Amino acid sequence: LDGFVDLGASVRPAREAVAYALTYLDAPRAGPATLAFGTSGAHRLWVNGGLVSRDDNYHPPRPDQQRLAVPLRKGLNAVLLKVCQAEG
């Protein structure tokens, strides 16, 4: 996926809120993959149930704010992102 997903447009109220986004990546073979994302609030990111990234800071979102290598299994891989928003 290449683009901007505005979770704030879907979550009301937008103050003191938590949103989750879940997707699946279908890998042709096991190995590392680079994930790039940006959030305005604190976040947690899990791949296949394992925590791979966390940040408790609040800042303006930017594309590719975070870039990290994650291990993928062959086949479907669950990617779950939790974003916290203190102010709307």
Image (cartoon, rainbow, N blue to C red):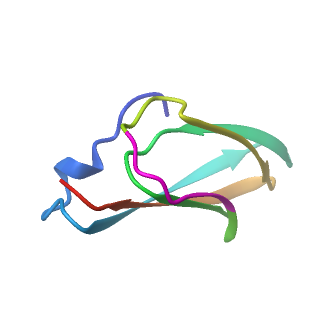
Task: Say which residue appears at 28% left-offset and 62% top-offset.
Answer: 86
Considering only vertical position in the picture, is 2 above or below 18? Answer: above
Seen from this angle, which residue lies furthest left?
13
The total of numbered circles placed on residues is 0
**Front residue of 27 and 79:** 79
Question: Which region is colored magenta?
Answer: 52-59
Horizontal side of 47 relative to 18 (left or right) equals right
Please check the rendered image and state whether residue 80 is part of the magenta-colored stretch, yes or no: no
Residue 62 versus residue 26: which sits nearer the camera? 62
Locate residue 7, reporting x and y percent: 28, 50
**Given the current orientation, which residue lies at the most extreme bottom position?**
49
Whether residue 44 appears in this view of the structure is yes
Whether residue 48 is visible: no
Give the x, y percent position of residue 51.
68, 66
Of 53 and 21, nearer the camera is: 53
Q: Whole-percent x and y of residue 14?
A: 17, 59
Q: Quadrant of residue 34?
A: top right
